[in-house]
Amino acid sequence: MTLSYLLLALGVAVLLNLGNRWARVAGQVLAAIALFFNVWSIWLAVEDGTFDNAAGQQGQVLALLGMGLVGAAVLLGLLLLLPGQWREAGPVPGRNGRTAWGQASRILHWASAVLMLCALPMGYFVVVLPAGAIRAEFLNGHQGVGLAVLVLLALRLGWQLASAGPDSPNALARLNKAALYALLAGLPVSGLLLSGALRVPVLGIALPALLSVEAARAVHQILSALFVAAFAAHAGAVLWHHFGLHDRALVRRMLR
């Protein structure tokens, strides 16, 4: 499962930032298909009574329902904006510049975003689903995706040290960027701590229990909530600049 999600994330990230219009259209269609199945899985859980049997987990159920609604809205947006990919686009250099991110940073950025959008609902499903093979599959996928995000973050930060990119537009944007980076690192690490506390192996490796189950779970849940808030602020600011202020250059720094 982890490999399939990683290939999906990299495929979407690469296709959306190529110059060929057919590739960009294919990337956006692929993203829409993946999002559809994400939303559909939440809808199936509603229909088959999975959420009705999740006693004591109403917060997680509401979070999943909210993700389903947001996902449906984003899916509609992807389809409505699909004709916009049918335009000419110049080449993107591999290295970062002072006015735009290079191809490598764009791929790492969007691959990480896709993986996180997969990891969040998977994590909530792990909490909501009853013990069994399906829950174990979601847990393994959630762990693997989290580790992949951590690796991509390390590559992304290392590349930015070697090739500096554009400055953030203001102090709030810099703070939000720092928070997102810290949470992208903290979430997988806290997940490892939780796995150790629960005595659940990660990639077949048994981890030490450094925290109690309650403490490790609380840390992971708090960081998850903070990431959702930081991600929403980031996405909201980008949408406001693009559609409200008509600042097309800001989005074009990271996307075709």
Image (cartoon, rainbow, N blue to C red):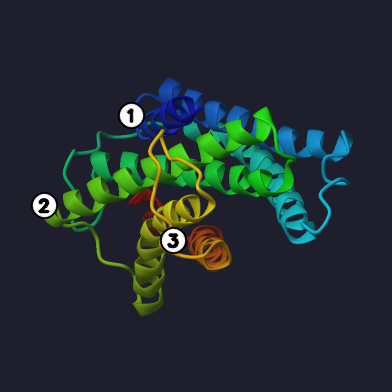
Measured Cα–Cα span from mark 2 to mark 1 = 25 Å
Q: Which mark is residue 19?
A: 1
Q: Relative to 67, say whether 227 is above or below.
A: below
Which residue is denoted by mark 2 in the rendering?
162
Q: Position of residue 105 (x, y in %)?
A: 27, 45
> Position of 2 compared to 99: left or right?
right
> Position of 197 compared to 225: left or right?
left
Nearest the viewer among 130 and 32 is 130
Q: Relative to 70, say whether 19 is above or below.
A: above
- First in sequence: mark 3 vs mark 1: 1
Q: Relative to 133, say whether 148 is above or below.
A: below
Measured Cα–Cα span from mark 3 to mark 2 = 28 Å
Q: Position of residue 155 (x, y in %)?
A: 23, 46
- First in sequence: mark 3 vs mark 2: 2
Three-letter code for the amino acid on which mark 3 is drawn? Asp
Question: Which part of the image, by quadrant, shows the C terminus?
Answer: top left
Three-letter code for the amino acid on which mark 1 is drawn? Gly
List the single residue furthest toward the bottom.
171
Which residue is denoted by mark 3 in the rendering?
247
Residue 248 visible in the picture:
no
State the SS at label 1.
Answer: loop
State the SS at label 2.
Answer: helix
Q: Position of residue 109 (x, y in %)?
A: 36, 47
